[in-house]
Image (cartoon, rainbow, N blue to C red):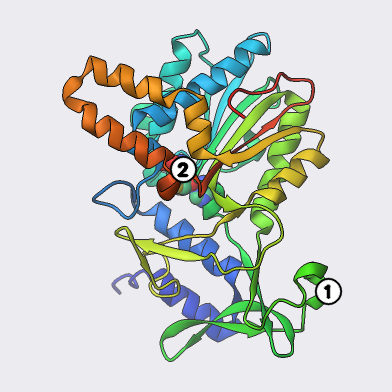
Amino acid sequence: MPPAEAKTLAERLAGLIAATGPISLARFMAEANADYYASRDPFGVEGDFITAPEISQMFGELTGLWLADLWSRAGAPANAHYVELGPGRGTLAEDALRAMRAVRFEPPIHLVETSPVLRANQASRLSTARWHDDLDTLPDCGPLFVVANEFFDALPIRQIRHSPDGWHEIMVDHRDGAFVPITWGPPLDTLVPEPLRDAPPGSVIETSPAVESTGRALAKRIAEQGGAALIIDYGYEGLATGDTLQAVSHHDHVDIFAEPGERDLTAHVNFSVIERIGRNTGLAVYGPIGQGDWLESLGIGARTAALAKAAPHRQAELIAARDRLTKADEMGDLFKAMALVAPDWPPPAAF
Ligand code: SAH
């Protein structure tokens, strides 16, 4: 008998829903993103989206200088580790580690990455790295210098919607051949923070158990081992309503529920949640501040000028990249930088 053809994720999820009922939005998002990243390199003009390190080498270099500056003011500990969460193509790490090498900060490299395709991509640039499925297997000893750019936005979220009879969880059903969001289950009004409970009908509140558990694991490590985490992502602060879940394909917003695994699903990161976890764990928290301000403080202007002087034919391209990373109407404001730093460590630069 010929082997049965492998089922697509859409077929598997439809089968699961038919058998057990609607699934949580977090499950849908987790399965869709795991499938999406496992099977492709989505970055760049030809791909689905472009990230800051892919726009310019300056992003990774300035990140590396930020890390090296903190390391050196902390007494240049010899047992430090570089850790990156969701390193994509490995471009940020490559640029950061080059800048760090220039000041003799050459830590072992640890990459937390689940996608086999992206692991292979990273290996071609970072041959000495060690890979991890999650934070559990990171080294237990020595300060960690952690970078997470556009990692937290890919972690699954839950949504609760204000319906006529109270706040209900949004689940995903499969009807007439399509995945559809529905409100489901008992009212969850007691889970909604008091100031938001009377938000207008249709309002949505998002939470992310995955962001919280990853944030807690990260904060605990830094509190126990020393070091810092630099988190850069698009997001907001404070209590807010709003549906920020989005699907991107070929640089365009597309239907979130069509073709799971074929498009990138993300949500805005609530920085206040990570900030609270950091403070509760005893860490010093800096920011969030706009990515534009952070890069300006680190000297992106001078770095652009220096690179343009060395390669005058690239001047226009370098200025365009700097503008894209820093201008308020581009990535400068929506993208934010936040640092979690071990207790009794020096304050980091640029906050
Ligand atoms: N930091 C990179 C890539 C951002 S895209 C850049 O700035 O270009 C998100 C990255 O996180 C990808 O590498 C993806 O494979 C990884 N990723 C997403 N969910 C993950 C998870 N749950 N665990 C580990 N890595 C994950």
- Left or right, residue 161 beside residue 342: left
Query: Residue 7 appears at what percent x and percent y?
Result: 39, 71
Query: Residue 229 appears at what percent x and percent y?
Result: 63, 32
Considering only vertical position in the picture, is 135 above or below 99? below
What residue sits right under mark 1 in the picture? 190
- Give the quarter of the image for residue 80: top right
Query: Residue 203 appears at what percent x and percent y?
Result: 64, 76
Q: Describe the element under mark 1 as helix, strand or loop.
A: helix
The disc, 2 or 1, on the residue closer to the chain's N-terminal end is 1
Query: Residue 303 appears at what percent x and percent y?
Result: 38, 21
- Give the quarter of the image for residue 302: top left
Total tally of numbered discs in the picture: 2
Q: Neighbour class for label 2 at 10 Å: few (<14), some, many (≥20)?
A: many
Amino acid at dot 1: Thr
- Left or right, residue 96 beside residue 50: right
Q: Neighbour class for label 1 at 10 Å: few (<14), some, many (≥20)?
A: few
Q: CA distance from mark 2 to mark 1?
A: 37 Å
- Residue 332's tag is 2
Amino acid at dot 2: Gly
Considering only vertical position in the picture, is 250 above or below 139? below
- Left or right, residue 296 beside residue 79: left
Instruction: Identify the residue shown where x is 33% and y is 71%.
Output: 5
